[in-house]
Amino acid sequence: MSKETIIAMLDCLIPGDTTGWPAAGQHGLSSRFLELLDNLFEQADKYLEIMLAELPDNFSALSTEQQTACLSSIENTQPDAFEAILKACYAAYYTDPDIRQILEKKTGYEARPPQPEGYHLPPFDESLLEPVRARGPIWRKVP
C-alpha cells in the first residue's frame, strides 16, 4: 500500500480550496483515516484492498480529472468499498481539531462536541407525559 496513493485519494475526495479549506491528504490525515476506517468497518482491510487494487499504480501522478474518473468508476463498480472509504475520509477530516477550528471561524458554530458542556435547553415539561401515564400499562404481566 502506497502512502502516496492514499494521500492522493484523500485529496481527490476532499480537495480543499483557496478559501482556507485544506485538502484532506495534504493536511496529513492519512494515518487518522486508516485508523477510523479500521474502527468503523469490520471489512476495512478488504475495502482498502479493493480501492487500492482498482486504482492505477500511478494514481498520485494523474491529473485531478483522471483521479476523479478513477474514483467515480470504483464508486460505480464497488459501491460498498467506496462508501466505507468516503465515510472514513469525512470522519477523519471533520473530527480533526484544525478543521473544526476552520469550521468555527467560517460559520460561528462552536468547534467542540456537544458534551460535556451541552447546549442550553428549556426545563422539561412533565405535563407532556400525562397522556401516556393516563393510558396505563400497555404490556401484559408475565405469569
Image (cartoon, rainbow, N blue to C red):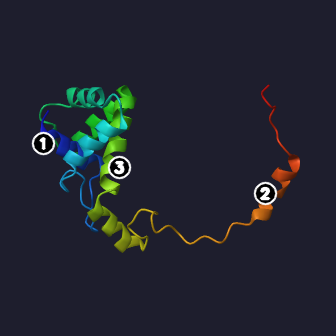
CA distance separating discs 3 and 1:
20 Å
The residue singled out by tag 3 in the image is: 91
Residue at left 36%, top 38%? 40
Label 2: state its secondary structure.
helix
Q: Is residue 45 visible?
A: yes
For disc 2, the neighbor class at 10 Å (few under 14, some 14 to 19, many from 20) is few
Amino acid under label 3?
Ala
Residue drawn at x 60%, y 70% as measured from the top left:
121
In this view, 47 is above or below 89: above
Position of residue 30 measured from the top left corner of the image (x, y, whole percent) = 20, 46
Q: Position of residue 57 (x, y in %)?
A: 13, 31
- Cα separation between marks 3 and 2: 37 Å
Which one is earlier in the sequence, the residue at label 1 or at label 2? 1
Whether pointer 3 and pointer 2 mark residues with C-beta atoms closer than 8 Å, the reply is no
Q: Tell me if mark 1 has few (under 14), some (14-19) or many (20+) residues whose alpha carbon lies within 10 angstroms of its own.
A: some
Residue that carries the numbered disc 2 in the rendered image: 129
In this rendering, position of residue 13 left or right of residue 113: left
Residue drawn at (26%, 42%) of the image: 35
Q: Amino acid at mark 1?
A: Glu
> Looking at the rendering, which quadrant does residue 138 occupy?
top right
State the separation of the CA atoms marked 1 and 2: 57 Å
- Mark number, residue 73: none
Residue 143 lies left or right of residue 5; in this view the side is right
Q: Nearer the viewer, residue 133 or 9?
A: 133
Badge number at residue 4: 1
Q: Picture coordinates of residue 48 (x, y %)?
A: 26, 32
- Position above or below: 19 against 131: below
In front of the other: label 1 or label 2? Answer: 2
